[in-house]
Image (cartoon, coloured by chain):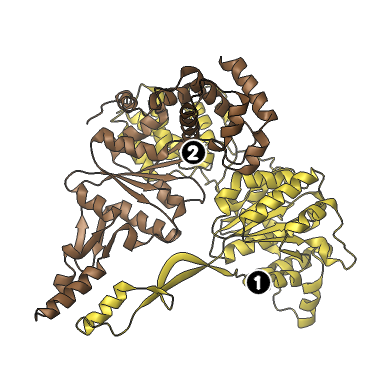
Amino acid sequence: MNFNSIDSLQSALRERNYIAEHGLATSLYLTLKLNRPLFLEGEAGVGKTEVAKVLASLLDTDLIRLQCYEGLDVHHAVYEWNYTRQMMHIRLSEASGEGTNESELFGPEFLLRRPLLQAIEQSKEKPPVLLIDELDRSDEEFEAFLLEILSDFQITIPEVGTITTPNPPLVVITSNRTREVHDALKRRCLYYWIDYPSFEKELEIVQARLPHAPEKLARQVTGFIQKLREMDLYKLPGVAETLDWITALVALDQQALDPIIVDETLGAVLKYQDDVEKIRGEQTRLILDRVKAGVD
Amino acid sequence: MSGQLIYNILLFGRVLRRLGLDVNPGRMMDLVSALDHIEIGNKPDFFYAARTLLVHEREDLQLFDEAFDLFWRKPAQSWDVQWQGLTRPRRPAKPIVLPPPLKDDAPTADNLGSPSQEALTVVEVTRTYSDREILRHKDFAQMSAEESDAVKELMSHLRWKISERRTRRRHPGKGEMLDLRRTLRRSLRASGEVFSWAYREPKRKPRPLVIVADISGSMERYTRLLLHFIYGMKSALTQPVEAFVFSTRLTRITRPLQIRDLDRALKNVGELVHDWAGGTRIGESLKFFNFEWGRRVLGRGAVVLIISDGWDRGDIELLSREMARLKRSCHRLIWLNPLLGAAEYEPLTRGIQAALPYIDYFLPVHNLASLEDLADRLADLDRR
């Protein structure tokens, strides 16, 4: 699909139930036009991963996801040889009396393709969206390696040769900032910080994602969450929590919020015991009163 | 595209750099090519395009927004004056003529030792043994300017090393994990017969260090030397070292300390921090640390050093709660107290009383010998 303006991209995203701010739409638009990786930061649950998914659906291409963790290495990010198959092959050719030569052992049929290699190989046909999720969880070694990949989209496997592609995949990197990602990597990318949405925008997201939720409930929950985000909590609820909470309340057949149901389901929203204790009871009532005064 | 526009864009880039933003020339080029794709007349589009290309740090977004607003409005006469309002060079600002220098009323260049004085002092490293012994045990607070210069020199020779942790990355070794890759490689030499197994073991890495130092009024006599000590540690260690200072509020000083030149680094710290020798609010400062920075700097088994005399004028219950949280999120919590050097000192202040239950090691930090002890302790943290 070809987009000739930021607005057209923004409305295409909206058609796919992704409500993007103008700033995010601009970043995405330039990512497509300039073919640079996009680096998304923001608190947990503001829809960073979702961006890559909707982008893949928009471009009608595959989404290849690499989930990062500490110790992630080339064998899990790029490729690995299938050793059990190789050993089996050695035994079988021994049994049949033929010797094994090394080059057949390290052929393509013994190669396990991990996400980065997959992304580069597929790019020859049709560039996929490559999502490198939660990069902050990986370690410096992997970051350095990634920097190399992002600069030339080229992978060398000693036994096979160099694999490269004329049209690189569209790269989306996300980070929750549990660690500072190195500047060199960020400099290479377009950067966008996804903030918590405003009340209107969050309500729009809720209505796009959960069209069957009662209007009143949706407004009250969104208002409640917005108020929670102004409070002194260790972990503020993201949009994901808003959606989870409404889903839970709909399952319980709630049409609106009341103090009892809030206290009973607060666990869907607040993920630290300190925070739950702080809000439960007195605070719940206060916030609810303010929400009802302002929203209804 | 008009040459004037490109000129202005390049100028804007220089202005941002002057403000301390880390603007990459490559992204400047990208911004120029982005103009082919966006409507230049549409200011929001241009704004967001410039923002996504030129900024890559959340902390810089606001500064960028203000700078953009000022730069791309119709030029007013009082341009210079308006720029004075923008501050906070996070990185060492590069010497560029434009715009006029930022604030020059920033506190404390002399507090931290101005470069001109220090450059003139020639430090004698070759002191006699007994001189050095006396110096090693002399309280920082009672040192003359000359002695403190000598100590700074000695301090820079301290060897810092922090005990290691097992990472989840593995490398060839004697561990319990089979290394099939190497096993197979070896076996090929014997036409596929496996004679010996290869193993992998967890790689070890030094733990990250986080230093939170009190720079309030009661610590003033130690502040200068302690900043040298922090700088020394940061440059000596290869792992991430994060540094914060507080009196009434917390300021992160990691970035300015990264500069190679010590005097400039300390001068930048001086400009960044606004509450030198103020009151002490340890509880509030730690809370701010826990909220804003804890999740970002305490991962991977970090060791935390708090440097403070524990004179707290804030909320004690808060201090105790935040210490508990801090303790839960790091590997070892070490409290360094300069007063602990005095023989008659007893940790009776309310602040220290509240903090003590959560501290792994409570150590003095009043002279060179105590720093040497600290170095030994840090290298050997996992044995208790």
The residue that appears at 62% across and 54% down in the rendered structure is B329
Report how far apart the C-alphas of labels 1 and 2 lie in the structure.
38 Å
Instruction: Tell me which chain appears yellow.
Output: B
Q: Mark 1 belongs to which subunit?
A: B
Residue A128, placed above or below residue A157: above
Residue located farthest toward the right when viewing the structure as drawn: B344
Disc 1 target residue: B158
Q: Amino acid at mark 2?
A: Leu
The quarter of the picture where the N terminus of chain B appears is top left
Quadrant of the rendered structure where residue B335 is? Answer: bottom right
Q: Mark 2 belongs to which subunit?
A: B
In the visual, does B134 lie left or right of A65?
Answer: right
Q: In the rendered picture, chain A carries what hue?
A: brown
Disc 2 target residue: B16
Q: Amino acid at mark 1?
A: Leu
x then y, percent, for residue A24? 40, 32
Q: Nearer the viewer, mark 1 or mark 2?
A: 1
Q: Secondary structure at mark 2?
A: helix
Is residue A104 visible to us here? yes
